[in-house]
Amino acid sequence: MVQKNYKGIMVSSAIYPFIKHMPLAEEYRVQLDQLLKNWDNLSLLNELSNSQTYIGDTQQAFSSLISELLNHLSFETLTKTSNEMAAKAQIAVDIVIRNLYERTADIGFLATDKDIRSFLKNTVSIYDPNYKEGIHTLKSRFQEYVAKYSVYYDIVLFTAKGEILLRLDETYKDLSKSKDPLINLVMNTQDDFVESYRYHDFLPNSKQSLVYAYKVTETNDKNSPILGTLALCFRFNDEMKGIFANLVSTENKECIMLLDNTGKVISSSDPYHIPLDATVEMNLHKPYKLVSFGGREYLAKTCETNGYQGFKGLGWFGHIMVPIEYAFSGENEQILGITKETLLGILQNGESFSDELKNIPKQAERIQKNLNRALWNGSIAQTKAESDNKKFARILLQEIGKIGALTKNIFDASIINLTQTIVLNNTTAISSLMIDIMDRNLYERANDCRWWALTSDFRNIMNKSTIDTQDKGVLTNILSYINGLYTVYSNLFLYDAYGVIIAVSNPNESYLIGRKVSKHWIDQTLQLQNSAHYCVSNFEQSDLYHNDYTYIYNAAIHPLSSEETKALGGIGIVFNSRKEFYEMLCDSLPKNLTGQIREGAFGLYCTKDKIIISSSNENHAVGSFFELDDKFFNLSNGESYSEIIIYEGHYYAVGATCSHGYREYKSENDAYQNDVIAIFFSLISDAKMNLSTSSSNFEVFTLPEDIADKMEIGSFWIGNRWLGVNLNDIVETVSVEQLQDSLTLDSSFHFKGTLIYKDKVVSVLDLKDFIKECNGAYSDIVIVKYVSERQERYLGILVHALGDITEVERCYITPMDKFFVSNGVIMDGIVIPKNSAHNDQALTLLNIEKIGKELVIQTSSSSK
């Protein structure tokens, strides 16, 4: 890996252009750089003090690890930023394409409207006598349409020759004819619609406009004569403004765009920043790219649409550009209610973390333990030494320990921050996307039922005193035709003023005809007095949906006479919720390189009462109760929440967002309110994991010099037991890695092997069974000496952690003879040091001579 020097630290050339713009990385670099300078000073003082402790290896190890840490921190920050950018660019284009897919169905259906056909048949031009008679009725119908489908701002009806017969926008009332190529294209197309984004001469005030057009024919027959052309004018700028508002972060000055296939900007979240019609450099194939625009450097990403139901529109791209100096300035999400140890455990056990990253805290911990061991040994050596600068050397060693601990803490803090960055990456962004897709989809359902309720044939036939077989056939054919175009419904049905079903779209459900539906939503629908309102069932099981859970959208059908407000009946449209909601979830979830949903990721839609509406995880059944903390459900509209939790034995990063509607749907002015929570789960690791404990610093405590009868004790920990040895009996502490395991003895035996210390074989003992302590990974071996048969001998004691070096008055040591081994004792006494950080805990002193004589003798006998 090619590296470059960044302010004294070697970093990868791949992140070199970006690291100076990363506030978090720079913050840690400054802190660690200052610590390195402190290390230099302490190293020099240490040599001058003759402290008998070498810290050069520790200094070098930390210095190397700093480089590795900053590389990973910068890389993950860059990855997080580029992932967020890609997600926003992808969402921007996919959301609008989903919307435009609905528009293709709209134009196809509206072009077959009976009233439009009748008007065109009877009207040759605006000078035709029939024109004035039909224009007011049809214009009122168009106004009803845009009141329901508010994504349109104008509807234009042309003759076959391009004469404008009717439009809603009065701005162009003097414009009588169009020569736009769109008219000819519509007349000759074999497609089901024409989609056009450019300048149109019938919309002269717009430099570019998005129009959906289709020919109006006499009948639905493919070869039927053409009567004229119908065009729906989409609120493109308005729509993009809403999409951008949900995506753009103001912190990093980003600009999100839609581009055409040449890279020209057709929509911009900030046209004063990156203007319309500008051509920008696209980046489709790399996670990120540094590009230049207007004399400024940007981080850029381009995404091709995934399309929807095979529809990809006009080949637009989502694009995002972030000024490089602001690209990494956003604040990281903070994880509440989770300990530092757990986060480090998640790092070690999570599958999404690289081995190199996992190794950083391990190395930092190993360096700290080695330093602690060196300082402990140095402190003991200084205590035994007769030197004029003994006090200074001891203070210096303590300062070295503090700097080491501070260095380790900064490493831990940066790793924890990095872990948070990775595990919480985009959780709420995904849950927000999930709910946005749902709100937008159901907006269309509310529009569909209200518009179809205005179908003239429905209103005329249902106003008859008797509906004969022929009439029912007409109703059925219309419903079936609509359902063929709008396939998100399992069935459409009409019911009379008594709630009795009179027609259905799905022939497989014709058995429902004649059945009276006694539901509260039927009664509420029949009470509606105008076409602006609609009614929706609760999310519940329904025999109208094969006893499965769904929403049924309803609108009242009124007579054509505007004076009559009493409903003739209603239309119910049964949303195919199991299929459609499941696909919405799956479309929203993150994918791997093969396009499959990322392993361990799943999503749900739930009611605020925690009832599952849909789940991408088959283990969570629709209609069942979802057990999750209330904090994920107690959200206001549009609010999000994220946290790391333990769920079903695993750690998950979870993001939740409450619905907030779309346009007028579920708005403050909408009588229908139904909050839904979208929840995204991202698997991190198994919750059953071994949490490593960080090494703690020891301290040196001394008594006043005028106290004569005192003992210096070197302490350590075995499990939770605080143990100590007379300092005169301690030789040195070495790493447990030096232990040579015994291959012949029972693993439960206290003898664990040997090590070579200064050409001497040292037996290493495990005392945990004698003091009733639990198992755990040992870190150090304390080598002690004792006299046996007039010879000085060594033995090693396995310990979990090194403790304080402290002086105690001998008069406070209480002898004890509680623990016997072969009629001897391994404990000498107990004392509570008054000058220790653990002054509320008893320190137990070991009898090294007895341990050596009794346990080593046992060991020797067993080996024979």
Image (cartoon, grey):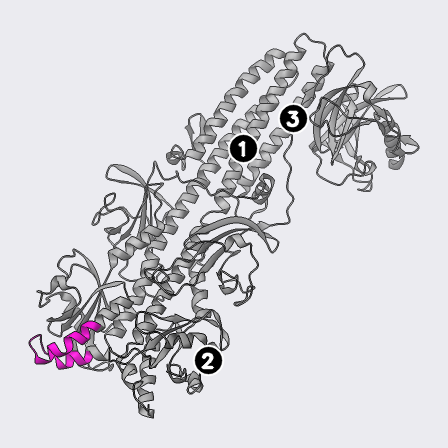
Mark number, residue 411: 1
Mark 3, secondary structure of its residue: helix
Q: Which residue is mark 2?
A: 518
Residue at the extreme left: 127
Q: Amino acid at mark 2?
A: Ser
Q: Mark 3 and 2 residues: CB-CB less than 8 Å, in contact?
A: no
Percent of width and height locating residue 778: 71, 35
Percent of width and height locating residue 785: 81, 22
Percent of width and height locating residue 852: 85, 27
Q: Amino acid at mark 1?
A: Phe
Up the image or down, 517 lies above or below 428; here it is below
Q: Amino acid at mark 3?
A: Asn
Q: Which residues are magenta?
A: 117-140
Q: CA–CA distance between discs 3 and 1?
A: 16 Å
Residue at image x 54%, y 21%? 39
Q: Which residue is mark 3?
A: 372
